[in-house]
Image (cartoon, grey):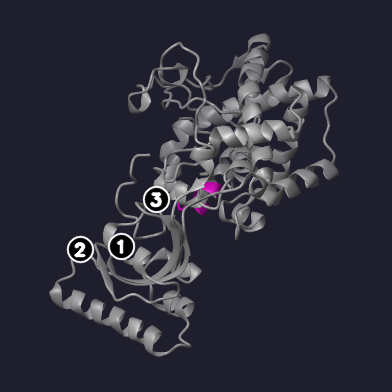
Amino acid sequence: MKIDFSRRLIGSVIVGMLCTGGIVSAADADKKAEPAEKTTPAPAVAAMPMVMPATAASVATTNTPATILVQVNDKTITQGDVDAEIGEISKMMQSRGRSGEQLAMMLPTIKPQVIDSLVVRALLADEFAKKNITVSDDEINKEIEKIKTTLPKGKNLEELLKNNGVSDKSFREDIMEQVKLSKLLGIGEPTEKEMKEFYEKNKSRLYEVPETVRARHILIAVNATDDAAKKAVKKEKAEALRKQLVDSKGADFEKLAQDNSDCPSKAMGGDLGEFRKGQMVPAFEVVAFSLKTNEISAVVETDFGYHVIQMTEHKTPRTVAFDEVKPQIAAQYKGRQLQEKAGPFIQELRDKAKITYQNGAEPVKPMMMPPAMGGAPNEENGATTKPTDKKSDKQDTLTVPADKPDDKAPAKEEPKKQ
């Protein structure tokens, strides 16, 4: 597991998410089934190892913005540089529902990783300059248009960036750096043959879409302290809302959800998006999958309270055709090549560089991790064998780990093991 905290690295992961997350229409459903802390490493600069909160690695708070923390060959990284990155991360975390207190608790871990990401960027900047590698606005725009073609149906790039606290300027900078890195590493567009081989190799894992439904609901929440009388009142309210929807064909489900639902999904008119079996609590799931399209359910009781559900779309299991996902495969293939080539290349740059830490800054310290899920140990979990990256290409979560429960309230049960 790798966590990238830098604002630039988070942006890079968003690029990777857009390039790889829209492989099939059920990609979002797969994301919901994954534990929240799983992250997708950036296809470019740098996937960094998970680190322990370092004692001396926490940069001294008495430093001024001009204080030099790291000397990288002839370049310097200052406290001001780190503060600017932390500020951007704070905006992103706030957009993900994190509080200032949570950010403060994470700072001892975040700061060393931010510093390390700035070191990587300095090393790469030197290489770009030496090799005279540049990227034009036209190249950036073309890359962004390619990314847009990989998005799942209904996904909007601008809205996605806004919802995750990423500015258009930062996103364009991330695209620029990744295009530069692709040029530096000699990574071009995959051939038709390479894409077809990738498709066949990953068909069962990536392109076989399970049965899914899309649903929306109105939740009248029940608190643990509610007595029988309070629960009865809330159930009566849910029943009244259902009656209004059933009796009046013109009733606006979206508006009723916005005005009455206690679920965060009310902001989307109660829409929970697309989900597969195993992602919602059983009582909710059974009803959602049994409804006819646009049918209104009876009131459903779960631990969250009382739900009125409407199933808006049902998809049967299918295998996505190659031509349907060709743009996504091209982006994903390049992203994987970047992952595989960037790590050794950046390590080589580190080995040749003169990097000096000072004024409280230290290199990140890898955490010794036990083998995951009983798997064989590798460098990432504390052993010395070279790891093979088999991360799921369906993962499309952002790098700031979200410990907040999914806004889709019915998904209360522990995500099932994949």
Residue 43 appears in view: no
Q: Left or right of 335: which side holds 372?
A: left
Residue with the mark numbered 2: 224
Residue sitting nearer the eye, 409 or 404: 409
Give the residue at the far left of this rendering.
228
For the point 25% across and 82% down, the residue is 236
x and y, in percent, of residue 284 in the image: 31, 63
Give the foreground label among 2 and 1: 1
Q: Does residue 385 sit above or below 153 in this rendering?
A: above
Q: What is the secondary structure assignment of the residue under circle 3?
A: loop
Magenta segment range? 92-98
Where is residue 42, by image quadrant?
top right
Amino acid type, residue under disc 2 in the picture: Ala
Residue sitting nearer the eye, 399 or 408: 408
Give how far apart the Cα atoms at labels 3 and 2 are. Answer: 19 Å
Residue sitting nearer the eye, 241 or 173: 241
Give the residue at the far bottom of this rendering.
248
Mark 1 burial class by Cα count in 10 Å: few <14, some 14-19, many 20+: few
Q: Left or right of 34: which side holds 323?
A: right
Q: Quadrant of the N terminus?
A: top left
Residue with the mark numbered 3: 404
Residue with the mark numbered 1: 286
Give how far apart the Cα atoms at labels 1 and 3 are. Answer: 25 Å
The numbered mark, 3 or 2, whose residue comes first in the sequence reads: 2
For the point 28% across and 70% down, the residue is 300
